[in-house]
Amino acid sequence: MTAYSLNLRVFWPLVTCLLTATWCLFQALRGHSTEQQEAGGCPGHAAGSGWQLLCKLSLLLLLCYIVIRCCSSPQQRQRAAPSLATQQQQQQQRQEQHRETQLRSYYDHQIRLSPHVLGHSKAHVSQIVSELIKVGKAKQHDASVTFRGDFVQVGSAYEQHKINSPDCFDILVPLKVPQSLKLELLFGAAGKGSAPLLQGSVRCGVAAPKKCEWVKIYKQFSDGFCMEIEHRHQLSSALVLKWFHWKIQRCLSVIRYQFEERCHITLCVCDEKLILKILPRSDYVCCHISMAVRLIPAFHLGDSVFLIAQPWAKALHQDTANLEAYWGLNFSKHEQRLMSWFKDRAPANSCHLKCLQIMKALRDLSCKAFQPSFSSHWCSILSSYTLKTAFFYLVLKVPFENWDDSFLMERMEDFIQFFRQCLQEQKLMHFFLGNNNLPSIITIPKMFKEAAPVNLLGGYQADILDLASFQLLNMWTQIPQIIRMNSNPKYFFRESSRCKHTIFN
């Protein structure tokens, strides 16, 4: 049965009209009887009676109107107000659902890489690099820097948050100094006011058992790889990069013939970074992807911490010889260990890596709309490393169960708000250097824990960080417009048939 409810907007006016009509009829009948009884009365008295009747009717209608307004208005306001709030809430929910639907669709079709393509690409890279290292280890001299014999896969492609295309990889190639020499780190050498790229950099001294042995035994090593700064031999990243380039070039000339039917391999230098380019030939290499592999010379400092050579002078546009002695610190193994630890405790369908991937993708799309003067600052402030550092702090801050995929939008909003807070405070501390609150699963040497804390945003001007904070919030609110800027989904995730090609025989 249909349930009916009382409509007060119709009920009270109807009651008023009925009561008014009844009262008017009563007054009319009463006036008519009075006229019959006083048929001989004067005309002025009849006119006065009509005027009094009109005044009474007007007062009665006004009284009824006031009573109706007093009785019905509060009820109508109480009924109308929740209705308006409900409509606004429903509209906001629809917008949020639409934005989430767009974001998830964009992730599936534009951000998430095909596991098949990425897996084959990593296999090709591993085989070529392993052959290079094998040749390099077989031909080396004890008095020089030598290959340790292995390589370390680092970066987003191996940490499962790679975006854009599966064609760029980072490989650390561990090196060794002569056995009797010892590396000694010199922290805080960059000084205050350094550019962001120098934050956290170190210099590396080289100590021999006896000073006199530098001239007798290690002169070749000293001339080829060291700089004398403050009366100390310090390892030069620029000289090591130069030697490393020469060494890889010779190794490549040896193995190139092994892969000439499968791919064309070349070595080039881009912004003083050594890039190994792999171009597939015919149908032999799976998925026909041209790959770029950055080879980074590194020295192991203990407990999976590496000292990596960086092209400081070129990157900072400075012609300072001392910058050639600076090295970077790499904690990739500890980062991978932290992610594995978190993955074991988070829900099976956790969205933590998805959040990081979406942030990097939105950063790249937003960058296209900026002026070139701000675009470089935007990409530097929101670099993959700073985003990953903020991500590490966030995953330890939010309870594990709240990373379920159903909370994707809430976690994305947390990510945005946390990074905006860092920009407003102009402070995002290095996650490993000088951090005494690391999870117990992460163990790093004592000298890194006790090092001076490093602010990754310390080298930027306040107005640049404020503008980045504003643009970050603007990026979050305009996701539907940004998502329309799609890129080519050639390498992205899709269900496909099994590839007919196999990995190298």
Image (cartoon, rainbow, N blue to C red):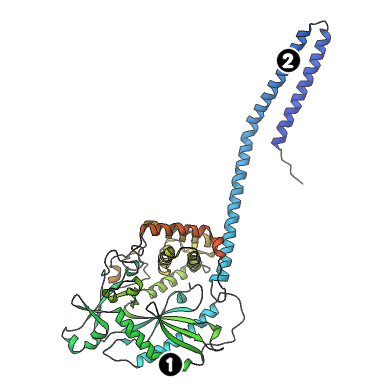
Name which residue lies at 51% across and 90% down: 262
Label 2 near label 1: C-beta < 8 Å?
no
Mark 1–mark 2 distance (CA, rounded to whole Å): 118 Å
Give the percent coordinates (x, y) of residue 442.
36, 71
Residue in the foreground of this view, choosing between 282 and 422: 282
Instruction: Give the mark nearer the N terminus: 1 vs 2.
Output: 2
Apparent side of residue 10 relative to residue 464 in the rendered image (left or right): right
Apparent side of residue 486 relative to residue 414 in the rendered image (left or right): right
Identify residue for label 1.
255
Q: Which secondary structure, mark 1?
A: helix
Q: Residues within 10 Å of mark 1 (few under 14, many from 20)?
A: some
The kind of residue on which mark 2 rests is Trp
Name which residue lies at 72% across and 15% down: 52
Identify residue for label 2.
51
Q: Is residue 420 visible?
A: no
Up the image or down, 416 lies above or below 157; here it is above
Name which residue lies at 53% across and 74% down: 113
Apparent side of residue 371 relative to residue 242 in the rendered image (left or right): right
Up the image or down, 147 lies above or below 380; here it is below
Apparent side of residue 342 relative to residue 331 in the rendered image (left or right): right
Residue in the foreground of this view, choosing between 214 and 319: 319
Q: Is residue 224 visible?
A: yes
Q: Residues within 10 Å of mark 2 (few under 14, many from 20)?
A: few
Q: Which mark is residue 124?
A: none
